[in-house]
Image: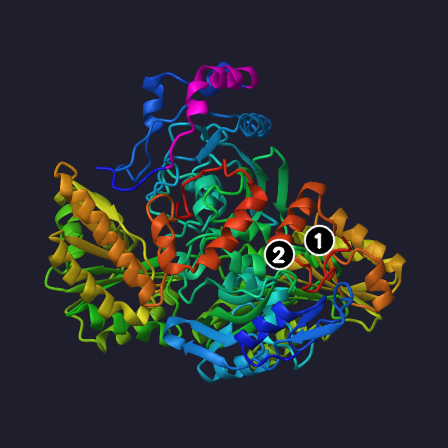
Amino acid sequence: MRAMKQLDPKPEILARRGEIIAGLLRILPKRAVIAEAVSLKPYETDALTAYRQVPLAVVLPEDEGQVVDILKFCAAEGVRVIPRGAGTSLSGGALPLADSVVVGLMRMNRILEVNYPDRYAVVQPGVTNIGITRAVADAGYFYAPDPSSQLACMVGGNVGMNSGGAHCLKYGVTANNLLGLRLVTMAGEVLELGGTHCDAAGYDWLGLVTGSEGQLGILTEVTVRILRAPEGARAMLAGFASNEVAGECVAAIIASGIIPVALEFMDRPAIHACEAFAHAGYPLEAQALLIIEVEGSEDEQDATLRRLREICERFAPVSMRVARTDEESAAIWKGRKGAFGAVGRISPDYLCMDGVIPTSRLGEVLRRIEEMSEDYGLKVANIFHAGDGNLHPLIMYDANEPSSFARAERFGAEILTLCVEAGGCLTGEHGVGVEKRELMRVQFSPGELEQMRAVKDVFDPHWLLNPAKVFPL
Amino acid sequence: MTPRDEEELAAMVRAAAGPLRVQGGGTKADMLRPVRAAAVLSTAAMSGITLYSPSELVLRARAGTRLAEIESVLAAHGQQIIAEPPRFFGPAQTIGGVVASNISGPRRIGGGAMRDHVLGVRAVNGSGEILNFGGRVLKNVTGLDLAKLLTGSFGTLAVMTEVTLKVLPAAEAVGTVVVPAADARAAVEVMAAGLGSPFSVSGAAYLPRDARAYLRIEDFAESVAYRCAKLAGGVAGAEILGGEESKALWAGIRDCAALPPGEAVWRVSVRPSAGPGVLRDVAFAGVSGFMDWGGGLLWLSGPATRAAHEAVCAAARGGAGVWWLMRGPEALRAAVEVIPPEAPALAALRRRMTAKFDPRGIFNPLKMWAA
């Protein structure tokens, strides 16, 4: 089933497995080292479950000092290192290599400081995304990036992948919500990047490290901005007769000067899958559905929703529903939030793509995906952050049928190539990981890739950190 | 040298025999360290907006395009550059220079910095290779974010030839809540309350000479009226300024109109609650200024002396923050640390990084650091 070539393990490392584990046990408490086959098994994959590889060992450091010791040891021994948060990567960002040590950060899960007057929180990388918001919600605050996996995914992984979410049209992605990081390099040096203030003097190391997919170092501390929550929020939905018309409606909303806090798009297969699963009352006669959320006081919500209604009405909606209460908003969101589960219910397996396109190309890109779907004989449902052009086609396949996964991967690659050709990019929020590594050549020239590799060299000259990810082999 | 296009620029870089002063309009030549170079490489002749799609919130322009031109085109479509770059540097500022310096105005506190809205950068590295990082879409995590690395690098890594920005609709209305503040500490409390409110305050500044703190709301007219009233409600002496007065006030704050005259100008960024301490700690050296970003940004001016500079550095350090020497005579800028020195490990990393982009060390040598 594995379609993609992997990096060969170093035989001299595999041969010295016992010695390396003994070395790790010398620098770490026994509870921090996992070497038994049965205990290593859960670390063989992440949320890109089609790829699996049991690592040499897993270590679970409990503080920065241990991370430093681990990296110094691995650097000295020439051992490859795979950083891991919660293992929710959809691009295989935490996929191990056979000769690698996985550094799991889940035990570094403390919130170190919350400062309301200066509106920041300092957390360890193993704190979950929702964990930050939960810690500050009583004071009326929240942490803005909200990836779908936010109940499980960890802040360290969010920084690694520069995660977004449904609300980043207004609040930005992870990079826009960070103030500082502590990063341990492969040489075991601790770098303090940024701080608790805005903007760096000197190079934007914070911006470079965010989204670097564990290529440059391992995080031990993250300082995030926390924001005061708005007075309230409410959603509406509108169904349209075609993807194109819904796309034009999105353009009209943006042109009107309204930036909704969320602007989600679902195509017909997604509407049907979600409705069957969640019974959210989605209009089954619609070819495309928009979910739009606005914020503010009750009156402000009413005023903005009135404007949005007027805009949607210009595009002959087949259905429109404006929530009057929180409960009605939740009902509108219910189907969208359960989308992955809903697709999982109608197909044994699926691949979740993450391309981005200029929003003006929406209609033609969705039309091409539909044609490809017929060519490959695989169904696809499209869910889409419409305001920012971030497409999430879910390609359905059956892992038990040998050719099905290979076809799904080719289909996915063709969609992402199409996204690049349309003026977009391979990934908006999931990262390149192992999944899109070879497609990097579609988006970047050899010179551009060489410049990126040179930056990786600066931090990790022997390429021990999360190798065989991001860059084509 | 003023190349007319990217290829010409790349050829000039390849042919360069020694260091180049890399600039757009040259308006930031008096900022940070002086660059000693036999030749000037300016992008000022590479001008023009190459893509503007208002409904996609994207604008792309050649590096030498003047900020003023871009802002007027955006304004004609009811849009704006989110980070509100100051016009402190005069009308010749180019978009390349604005991105290369990553200097943001009052809206930074809520809307983000220039660097948060740079979607893509085309640039020529020190080997004369034309490279394109990022793109034109609003979300992009493909590969290492070298567009962010180049943003704010003052032309020391590569020469930007074209930049792509996320833009946003300009708000329909603007209003300002004015609150009397006896001193900087009282002002920070007012600003923290505003920024900690659910009302999306888009500017929070304190001008000591007015003894007032200002909170800005930008949104649809009905929201501005409602939110200003909520913020002002129950606050002794609070007043509300309307649209035109607000616009003039915030343009002045953005462009540092309130900066007392002085020979040197600094910018300090600290966490907001540390702002008053900075103002207090520089006063003895004859340095004074005002606060933006809720107290987190200080624009300071004073005598162009080493003693005054050291006072600014010490105050910034005391607030766990950073400083930039924004303007000053060449002798001072050559003699002092114009931005904070890095920790040794980071400095070593930075030198290796510079060498990977500009192996001959020809781009703006020593503009940011003395070594």
Can I make out residue A447 in this image? yes
Give the residue type that dot 2 points to.
Asp
Q: Give the residues drawn in magenta, as a range.
A: A7-27
Circle 1 is placed at which residue position? B322
Identify which residue, A294 or B223, lies in the foreground: A294
Residue A201 lies in what quarter of the image?
bottom right
Looking at the image, residue B307 sits to the left or right of residue A160; the answer is right
Determine the chain carrying the residue at label 2. Answer: A
Element carrying mark 2: loop
Asked whether the beta carbons under mark 2 and mark 1 sit within 8 Å of each other, the answer is yes
**Element on which disc 1 rests:** strand
Q: Position of residue B133 (x, y in %)?
A: 48, 61
* Residue occupying the point 49% across, 54% down: A450
Q: Chain of mark 1?
A: B
Residue, disc 2 = A199
Residue name at image x 83 percent, y 57 percent: B336
Residue A304 in the image: state x and y as whole percent: 35, 69
Which sits in the foreground, A52 or B165? Answer: A52
Majority secondary structure in the magenta region: helix
- Left or right for A425, reference B49: left
Q: CA distance from mark 2 to mark 1?
A: 9 Å
Q: Is residue A338 visible?
A: no
Disc 2 packing (10 Å; few <14; some 14–19; many ≥20): many
Quarter-wise, where is residue B247 in the image? bottom right
Name the side, left or right, on which A135 lies relative to A375.
right
Q: Is residue A130 above or below residue A372?
A: above
**Magenta residue check for B158:** no
Residue A407's place in the image compared with B54, above or below, is above
Q: Quadrant of the N terminus of chain A?
A: top left
Dot 1 amino acid type:
Val
